[in-house]
Image (cartoon, rainbow, N blue to C red):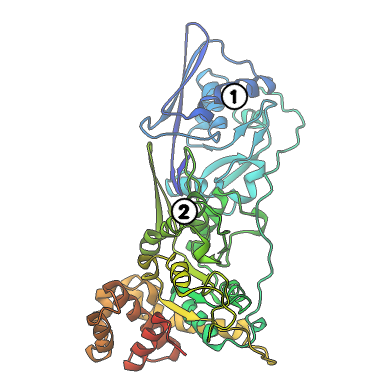
Amino acid sequence: MVLTGLMGHVIDVEAHVARGLPGFTIVGLPDASLAEAKDRVRAAVASSGVEWPRHRITVNLSPASLPKSGSGTDLAIAVAVLAAAGVVDAALARDLVLLGELGLDGRVRPIRGVLPAIAAAVHAGATRAVVPAGNAAEAQLVSGARVDAAVALATVLGALGAEATAESLEPVPAPAARVRQVAVPDLADVRGQPLARHALEVAAAGGHHLLMVGPPGAGKTMLAERLPGILPDLDDAEAVRVTAVHSLAGAFDAAAGLMRRPPFEAPHHTASSAAIVGGGSGLARPGAASLAHAGVLFLDEAPEFPTRVVDTLRQPLERGEIVLHRAHGATRYPARFQLVLAANPCPCGMFAGTGEGCTCTSVVRRRYLARLSGPLLDRVDIRVEVGAAARADEPGEDTASVAARVQEARGAARERLAAQGWTLAGEASGPWLRRVTSRAACAGLWRAVERGALSARGFDRSLRLAWTLCDLEGASSPGVEHIAQALALREGTAS
C-alpha cells in the first residue's frame, strides 16, 4: 500500500530472479528512502537465517506511473524476492497485504499511516494483512480486516513456508504519539460574557466560523477552548477520517481507539504556511488545518499571524479540503473545520469602550486589524466584541446544558437537510436556501447588499446563520427577526 494523502493505492510488488551478475534493482518510481530498501532487505533476510539469492534481481512496484515513497514496502519486497527465488510459497503470499519497515536485525519496524492504508486495502477487497507489531492495535481498528502482527521477518517467512531462524526478538514499539491529554474544560468556568457565550453556541449549532475581538483577559481563549466541548461526538465515518489524519501525522494513540471527540488545534502565531496547511518534500504531511478536521482550528492573536499564512485558509474554508500540489502530483487532505479567531482591538490591547488607557493612534489600530484580510473575514460568519471581564459571582451555564441545545438544533437541521445530502446549516448551498426562504425575510439581506455592506458570499452566509438561529429556537423557518439577528452577528453589532 502507498498513501497519497489519505488516498491509498494497492501496489503489486513483483520480483524477477534471473541468471547473470548478482544485482538488485527496484523500479517503479521509488524515492530515495524506498530505493535504499534493497540494502535493508538484504541485511534483514540474512539476519533471518535465509540465504539471499545470488542472481540478478529486479523488483517492480506496479503501477509504475505512481510515485512511491517511504519504507513501508520493505516487508513486501523481501517476501516477493524470496517467493521468486522459490524460498517461500508464492501462493500463500498472493493477495496478502504486507506493511512494515525492516531493520538490519530482521525486526519489522512500525510505520506511519497504517490505519488509512489498511482501510484502503479493505475497500479494494484485500482483507488479509500483516503489519508491524507496533502498529497492530491501530490496524485492528479497521472493521473487516484480518490482521496479523509481525515482530520479525523470520516469523513471516516461516508462516509462508520458508526455513527461517526465528530468534527471540523484542518487538519494536511504535514511536510515542504526540498526543496532548487535556481535560475538557467546562463552559461554566467562563463568568459573564453572555453575548460571546451566545455566539459560541450559535457557531457550534451551525458549524459557523467565529471572530472574537476584545482586550487581554476578557476570556476569548477560554471561550474558544470550550467550543469542542459543546460539539457532538464524531460519527463512525468522520472518526475514521480524523483518526487516519492523526495517524499520518504521528499524533494518534491507538490504545485509546478511534478519535470520537472533535479535535482542537491551536498553532502558535509563528507557524509557517506548511505548518498550517501541510507540506514537506515527497509526501506532503498534513498541517494544523487538516488535524482540526471535524473540529476547531483556533488562531489566538490572529493579527500576529503573517497575512500570507492566514490567507492560505481561504480555499479550505470554502471547499473543506486542502490540495497540496508538488512536482510529482497532488496530495489531498480533509479540512472541514470551524475557524475561531481571537484578536486584541489594537497592538497594546487596551482600546475598549472609551479607549481609556490605549496608547495606539487610530491609524495604528486600523492597520493592526487590517492584517486580517477582507476576503478572509468575508468567510467568517460571526463577529463579536468581547468586553473587559466584569464581576460575575454566579457561574455561567455549564457545557452539558449548552451541548444539549446544540445537539437538538443540529438534529433539526439534519432532518431538514437530509434529502440534500447536508447535515449542518453552515453546509447548505446558497441557491437552495434562497429558494426555501421567504422573500419577505430576505428583504433585509438584499438591502444590505444594495448599500454595499454585504457581498454575495456574505448574503449566503448570513442566510445560513439565520437558519441556525431558527433551529436553536425550534422555528420552522427564519423570519425577519432571525435575519436581523444574523446580520447583527455578522457585522459585529449584536448586543
Give 288 or 216, whichever is nearer the viewer: 216
Disc 1 is placed on an element classified as helix
Dot 2 or dot 1: first in sequence order is 1
Residue 435 percent location from the top left of the image: 23, 81
Above or below residue 298? Residue 46 is: above
Which label number is shown at residue 324? none
395 or 349: nearer the viewer: 349
Q: Quadrant of residue 181?
A: bottom right
What is the distance, in whole Å, between disc 2 and disc 1 at their CAs? 35 Å
Q: Do the residues labelled 2 and 1 touch (CB within 8 Å)?
A: no
Q: What element carries label 2?
A: helix
Which residue is label 2 attached to?
277
Q: How crowded is mark 1: few (under 14 residues within 10 Å), some or many (20 or more)?
A: many
Coordinates of residue 330 in the picture (x, y in percent): 38, 44
Instruction: Residue type at mark 1: give it.
Output: Val
Residue 475 seen: yes
Q: 137 above or below 53?
A: below
Residue for point 52% across, 79% down: 200
Residue under pointer 1: 41
